[in-house]
Each structure stands twice: as structure tokens, then as C-alpha cells.
Amino acid sequence: MESSLIFEAVRARFKAQARTRVLAFGSSNTQRFLPEMHWFDVFELAINDTYGKIHCCINTGYGGNTAEDLLNRFDDDAAFYQPHLAFITIGGNDSMRKMTEAQFEFNLRELHRRFSNKGCMAVFQTYYSPDPARNDDLSLFYRFMEIVREVAKTTGSGLVDHLRRWELLRKAYPELYLKMMRDGFHVKCDGNMLMGLDIARHFSAAVSQDTVPGFWDESLRIQHLIDALEK
């Protein structure tokens, strides 16, 4: 199943009002450790506002994890919940620990195989852009994100390519980019909100702007700025 077909299949499931368990599986980019909005919160709200409360969101992100760590805890923290859809966001720690490209790719494919065997659709995500001024050589990180793209394509998984869009933002609007970064490798609330809005769009979902007027304005403005850069 091609990436676009994964999103189409999930949208069809949502439209049919089929109860759907959604798992967020990753490292510190996924773990809920900061106050305010998280990208998975935004996704959950967007699905609720667009399709109704037909989903259950489960976050088993764990800071510092590699793809191998996800495999090691797969039974307890993924298969146990019997998800229908899983977001897999991994690779930063793998690159920093200088995992080989071959091993990283193998681990990603094994994650896909295990989810697929459980009847779960997988969506891989690339990271947002790390700040090159606050990190050492990032060449392996960028290579690993390319491997994420390749594995998503060849396995027919979904792909949300945050890195591609964030690189446009970082280069065109560096001050705006830095405003959303908590440190050189993690985002703050507004960075999470941008990610969540981008993820939701893959499922034809959007947050309601009527519940708290003005709450989403800045995040939507930044999203539209990146949209313009893509044209």
C-alpha cells in the first residue's frame, strides 16, 4: 500500500466512524514531558473536531530511545494496545550513537513488519530541523532521515516529512524557527503545534478555530508561510 493509500485508508476509517486506536511510538520527540500542547494533542483534537470522538490516542514515547529500543519494548508498549494506526518517530538518538546505516534501516523495517503483522498501519515521521549552531556534525542525522523516507516508501507506509518543511522554515525565517526550539534538538509548544497541524492535514483533519478564538492563529500563520515556501 503506497503512502497516500495509507492516509486514504485511515480517512475512510474515520469517515465510517470506526473506533480507532492510535499509537505514538518514539523517543523524546514523542514523550509527553513538557506542559502545554504536544503534537499528539493537536492531532487528537483535529480528529475529534473533524470526525468526532471515534479514536483513542495512546502515547508510549520514551526519551533517549533508538529504533532498537522500540523493538525491545514493542510487545509491552505497542502490541499490547492493539493499535490500528501507529506513528513511528525515531532516528535522532540512533544517529548520535553512530548506529550503522544498515542496522538502522533493518530496525525500521522490522518495526514495520511487526506492526503490519498485527494489522496496524504505520506512519513514519522525520524529525523537525535540529539547530546546526547547537549541534556537532549532523550529516549522519540527515542521512538517517533519508533512510526513514526510503523505508516508508518501499514498505508502503505513511510518511509525514516534517524535516523537509522545517528546513524551508529554518533557512527562510531563522528567528521564527529559533523561537520554536526549546534547545538544539527539541521543540517548544509552538513547534509541537505546527507539527500537529501538519500531521492532521494528512488525514483531512483540522482543529476548530471557534472553541478558543485566536488560539491557533500564530501556528496557522507559520504553517501558511511554509506552504508558500513550498510553491
Image (cartoon, rainbow, N blue to C red):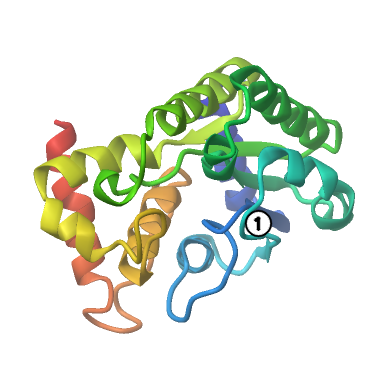
Q: Residue at 85% of width from left, 38% of height from top? A: 118
| Residue of label 1 | 17
Residue type at tag 1: Gln
The image shows residue 151, relative to residue 137, as above or below, that is: above
Q: How many marks?
A: 1
Residue 223 or residue 60, whichever sits in front? 60
Q: In the visual, does 13 lie left or right of 150?
A: right
Q: Residue at 53% of width from left, 28% of height from top? A: 148
Question: How far across and how far down the image is residue 192, in percent?
Answer: 40, 62
Residue 54: name its quadrant. Answer: bottom right
Residue 28: name its quadrant. Answer: bottom right
Question: How far across and how far down the image is residue 40, in percent?
Answer: 53, 62
Q: Residue at 65% of width from left, 27% of height from top? A: 104
Question: Quick one: quadrant of the N terminus?
Answer: top right
Question: How far across and how far down the image is residue 226, in percent?
Answer: 19, 45
Q: In the visual, does 7 lie left or right of 160?
A: right
Question: Quick one: quadrant of the C terminus?
Answer: top left
Residue 164 or residue 145, whichever sits in front? 145
Q: In the visual, does 19 lie left or right of 72?
A: left
Q: Secondary structure at mark 1?
A: loop
Residue 84 in view here: yes
Residue 73 or residue 98, whichever sits in front? 98
Residue 8 in view here: no
Question: How far across and how far down the image is residue 76, in percent?
Answer: 88, 56
Within 10 Å of the Cα at label 1, are there few (<14), some (14-19), or many (20+) other Cα atoms? some
Q: Residue at 72% of width from left, 29% of height from top? A: 107
Q: Of all residues shown, which one is farthest toward the bottom? A: 212
